Amino acid sequence: MRYIFILSLITLFSFEINDNKSNPYINYSLNISQAESFILNDNYSEALQHYKKAFSINVKPIAKNCFTAMQIAAIENDMNFFKKSVKKGFERGLIPEYLTNDSLIGSYISKNKIEKIINSQFEISNKKYKKSINYKLLDAINKLSDLDNKWKIYYLDSLSIYDSKNKDIYWKKYDSIISNIVDVKLISLITKYGFPEERNIDLNYLGIKSLSNKPNYDYSFGNNKTKLILLHYYSYPRDKSYNQLLKNEVFKGNLQPEIYASIMDFQSKFSNIDEYYNEWHQTEDTNKFEAINKRRLEIGLLPFEEKNLKFKRGQKICKEKRENKNHKQVRLFYWCG
């Protein structure tokens, strides 16, 4: 029933979906979103077809999408597409350890005795991945991220807590710092090189690696440094000066739609600007839901009601994990799930 509900919402905006498929990055995102819709309903054969469509588009795939595609290919026992997804994943920064540590992918590799093939593919594809990194941009973002973290911890996470009487002073101090980081430095980098994210800088393992033999499910892949800088920036009242610049980066493929949507939700919440995407902060005004879902579809995201279903699925898996239940589940990278 839940998929029928989402499908009816998608049908309402079918014109926008078809119109946006002319952009390869939006087309890619829509196919990934639709694949995840079928995963929510445990319809893995249909999900596999949408991953195949997404990976046939001439764009750099996102690493976590490659990982989920491997899982689906393993479930459906499609060895050719499994190997294709592995190759694409390694070209985007995944490493063999991530694969073998996963219950679905690891058991499929072991069962089919393809460990040597996997390692050989990694040696070839990892070289391509390293050549794709803009190291100059990566170094600049690392320095800005370190600067942001240093002063956020100093002013907001320390002084404003221990000296709460002067909290406003510390918040203004940090505001001046994060404003300089974004207005003077980051925006010029985005304008020159494109949005610094995993398609043009490096891929990170996002999560705490397990120190025991127990599998860890609280992780994802990506590069969140620029995202976090902008979320800190938009936690203060701002105008819409950079909205179009950032939106254009979505259409160029440099900025993932869900990250852009999250940034705009912060702006909407803290700047009294009604441009919600309901990806992070959400408005409960039902009169705005249709406009929100049209915005989402424009950038390659399906209705936010489905995003909420993915979030609830992740919460359920977190609970099951705490109860030590079996966790051979397909990862959509929403919390534990």
Image (cartoon, helix red, strand yellow):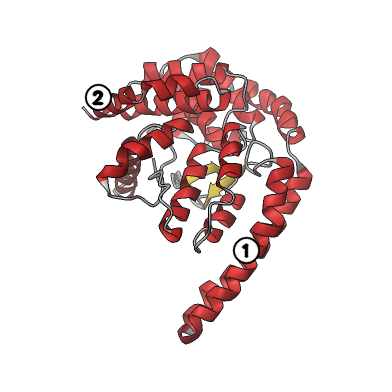
Q: Position of residue 171 (x, y in %)?
A: 53, 74
209, above or below 307, in the image: below
Q: Are marks 2 and 1 in contact (CB under 8 Å)?
A: no
Residue depicted at 44% across the width and 19% down the height: 18
Instruction: Give me the disc on residue 179.
Output: 1
Tell me if 50 is positioned left or right of 229 in this view: left
- Write down the quadrant of residue 185 in the picture: bottom right
Q: Which residue is mark 2?
A: 4
Q: Give the CA distance from mark 2 to mark 1.
A: 45 Å
Quadrant assignment for the C terminus: top left
SS for tag 2? helix
Residue depicted at 32% across the width and 46% down the height: 315
Tell me if 255 is positioned left or right of 142 in this view: left
Q: Position of residue 225 (x, y in %)?
A: 61, 52
Given residues 304 and 68, the one toward you in this image is 304
Q: Earlier in the sequence, mark 2 or mark 1?
A: 2
Query: Which amino acid type is shown beneath numbered disc 1?
Result: Ser
Residue depicted at 64% across the width and 30% down the height: 90
Instruction: Give me the disc on residue 224.
Output: none
